[in-house]
Image: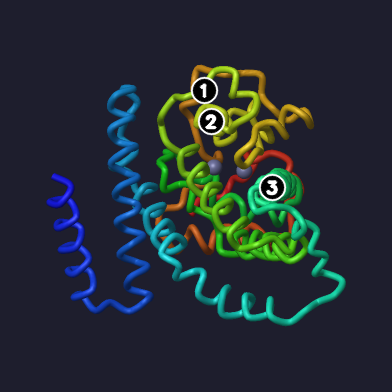
Amino acid sequence: MTAQVQEGLQELLALWRSLGLGPVEKNIVLALLLGLAFFVVVLVVERATRTRGTEYRSKDFLFDGVYWVWYRSGLNYLWFIALIFPSLEYPIPWLDQQLLRPYPIAVQALLFFLVSDFYVYWAHRAMHRFAPLWAIHTAHHAPERLTFASSARFHPIEIALFYIGSYLLVRLSGSDPLAWMPVLVFMEIMLQAQHTNIPWRLGPFYRILVTPTFHRFHHSRDPAHFDHNFGGVLSLWDHLFGTALPQRGPWPTALGVEGVRHDTLWSTLAHPLRLALRRRGRHAAAAAPGVVVERT
Ligand SMILES: [Zn+2]
Ligand SMILES: [Zn+2]
């Protein structure tokens, strides 16, 4: 049996090599395969928990899927890596503090995770607090239906801001790539799980981890739920800083931003920018997602 599995794997590898794909194509195919595998697991669990609805037949899922392939396939990373990573070779004394370097890899990974997730929490709060940032962040909040792929629906400007923060953390910490890379991958997987329709609360861990239930309240269009549950992976920060909603269910069913619906892929990019550049009423729009009243 083991020999058969090995043989099968070798045949698959041979087939993969025979395709003669370049690095970009490889990334796209790998992202699609990874997405498909994740999708199958989510579908099975959603079916088992009887939570599967009409999400997968929506335009939102189509747009989210495009973002998912774009970001996860590495297309988006190319310019980022091309521009920024070579700069790691050049020392910047005030930035290269090597704060985590003296510790073992596992400790570096744990500390890097805690600091990164803390940063995500505050960056997310800022996206809701300041009007131009909220305008950009509406790209993530616009979908009225959530699927794992909604975890990738972020405006490129928000992603760029996030990269800058992550880059600064990597440099300040001086941590080994073996420590920070698995952490970033783990955070991505958790982000995807949070956007599924699996109604897991994880019992007592609800106060520590961001579950799909916890994050669904963040996407609610009910004003009572606005500006809560900002956590990235840990809900701990929300409980510590008083932004956690006490509710644990039932799930909010009305999601999205009142008056904002992206009917085309282009509008997912252009509409947040138009909102950000609009002078009047910007601050009000930042304070409460529901007051954005423009349709696209
Ligand atoms: Zn948000
Ligand atoms: Zn979200």
**Which mark is nearer the camera, 3 or 1?**
3
Q: Position of residue 168 (x, y in %)?
A: 74, 64
Q: Secondary structure at mark 1?
A: loop
Q: Residue at x 65, y 38 (%)?
A: 231
Distance from label 2 to label 1 (Cα)? 6 Å
Q: Nearer the viewer, residue 50 or 129?
A: 50
Vertical arrangement, residue 245 with respect to residue 284, above or below: above
Position of the N terminus by quadrant: top left
Kindly identify the amino acid type of the residue bearing the numbered disc 1: Arg
Please give the residue where the numbered disc 3 appears in the rendered image.
107
**Which mark is nearer the camera, 2 or 3?**
3
**Image-based side of 144 in relation to 173, left or right:** left
Give the image quadrant in which the ligand numbered 2 is located. top right
The answer to whether marks 2 and 1 mark residues whose Cβ atoms lie closer than 8 Å is yes
Label 2 beta carbon within 8 A of ligand 2: no
Q: Position of residue 70 (x, y in %)?
A: 42, 64
Please give the residue where the numbered disc 2 appears in the rendered image.
211
Please give the residue where the numbered disc 1 appears in the rendered image.
201
Kindly identify the amino acid type of the residue bearing the numbered disc 2: Thr
Q: Residue at x 71, y 47 (%)?
A: 111
Q: Residue at x 74, y 66 (%)?
A: 171
Distance from label 2 to label 3 (Cα)? 25 Å
Q: Nearer the viewer, residue 276 or 50?
A: 50
Q: Quadrant of residue 169?
A: bottom right
Kindly identify the amino acid type of the residue bearing the numbered disc 3: Val
Which badge, 3 or 1, is on the more N-terminal residue?
3
**Image-based side of 254 in relation to 287, left or right:** left
